[in-house]
Amino acid sequence: MTPLLIRGIGSLVTNSPDLPGELGIVENAAVSVRDGQIVWVGSDDEIPVALQRSTSLDAEGRAVLPGFVDSHTHLVFGGDRVDEFVARLDGASYEEILASGGGIHSTIAATRVAPTDDLVEQSAGRARRMLRSGTTTVEIKSGYGLNVADEVRMLQAAGRVGDETGIGVVRTFLGAHVPDRDIVEADYVEIVIEEMLPAAAPHAEFCDVFVDRGAFSIESARCIFAAAVGYGLAARVHAEQLTHTGAAALSAEIGAASADHLDHATPDDAAALAAAGVVAVMLPGAGFSMRARQAPARMLWDSGVTVALATDCNPGTSYVENMQFVIAMACLEMGLTPDEAVWAATRGGAKSLKRDDLGIISVGAKADLVILDAPSHRHIPYRPGTDLVWKVIKGGDLIG
């Protein structure tokens, strides 16, 4: 890769010294990248002579920050659920829609019949929009297959999305999204453990379980996660979204990488998550889209829990692709400060994915950067709905 020197940076968010909410801002900065990594960071007035011969990009006083790490999405799916959205506006609840054959099950049906190439093409379109708006790494879950063949197919499609778009992809097996229709929970859990996990594990880094009313119990989740460990998959947990089930406590008990949603989390849950080092992934797009309560992000942060932000991009309850909008919602509806929200959308997301090389601008880190058409990262929540991304650099390559 051609070495690239980005100079004339008005305000550089480095996220170093790697402390929650500490952005490590460098004014009048420059960054040098080579072979997909950051090789130098410092003042524009102190650029080493050897680096000055690199291809140069003048940021002209703009702000630069690490690429957004979207650590919770359901990006690969077939069809849409716009009719369900309208039904919710008319007063239908999530559970009512699910019981009538809509919800997750309608997406499962559409995903199963969609040709793989179509799934990849549609999902790649979403991924390209994400990349252009500053998301350089995205976690993608399965969970709309609910059988061995389609769960594996979804994970393979997610890998192809990364290959075809250039966005970084981290894959999560979510065979335990909801039990498949006409199969009792205990029997379905056995299928997940005995059949799906062995087939899906080579294509994933994490295993997730939706623990909630209408999905899976604590006992079922504990069994699935115990089996997943044997395949080298770390745990992520859909926790405390629709009601309080004890899933946050389970996340702490098993040392999960993350507990996601947490709309009904309590102070006791926060204390347990903080003590166990479990990252709380906040998904304000879901609460916004469903007109429901938002997770207590302020309480969790003040309790010492590491907080991440993500879109929860999915066709039913949060068709949100843009992390800039998520940052704005986290400030306006969840009570995070702009500095906290930007950290959570970059370094926080990286920590939830156990990626030390992402969400930070320091020597040796991956060269994933976003240049804003604004003088400060604080313009992101200040101007909600405006795409402020001027240029994206992914793995040292200039995207646009």
Image (spheres, helix red, strand yellow):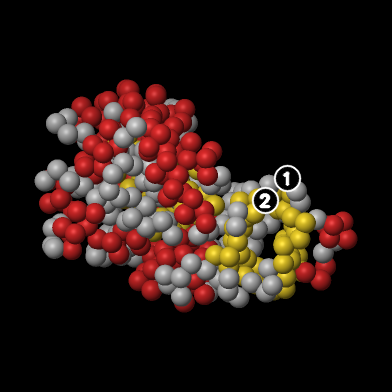
Question: Residue 131, labelled with which disc?
Answer: none
Q: Is residue 96 visible?
A: yes
Percent from the top left, x then y, of residue 385?
42, 70
Check disc 1 and report its element: helix, strand or loop: loop
Q: Report the residue at 35% width, 71% height from top.
A: 333
Question: Residue at coordinates 52% horizontally, 68% vertically from top-left?
Answer: 388
Whether residue 187 sits left or right of residue 29 in the image: it is left
Q: Residue type at mark 1: give it.
A: Met
Q: Nearer the viewer, residue 198 or 92?
A: 92
Cα distance in 3D space between marks 1 and 2: 7 Å
Q: Earlier in the sequence, mark 1 or mark 2?
A: 1
Q: Is residue 123 above or below residue 342?
A: above
Q: Quadrant of residue 195?
A: top left
The image quadrant where one finds the C terminus is bottom right
* Residue at 24% in and 50% down: 81
Image disc number at residue 1? 1
Quadrant position of the N terminus in the picture? top right
Which of 339 and 77 lies nearest the eye of the viewer? 77
Whole-percent x, y for residue 94 in the image: 18, 53
Q: Are marks 1 and 2 in contact (CB under 8 Å)?
A: yes
Q: Tell me which amino acid carries mark 2.
A: Gly
Q: Is residue 22 left or right of residue 53?
A: left
Name the residue carrying label 2: 396
Q: Position of residue 158 (x, y in %)?
A: 44, 38
- Residue 201 image position (x, y, % from top left): 43, 29
| Above/below status of 301 relative to 249 | below
In this view, the residue farthest toward the right is 49
The structure residue drawn at horizontal position 76% and vertical position 51%, both measured from the top left corner, is 3
Q: Is residue 350 left or right of residue 140?
A: right
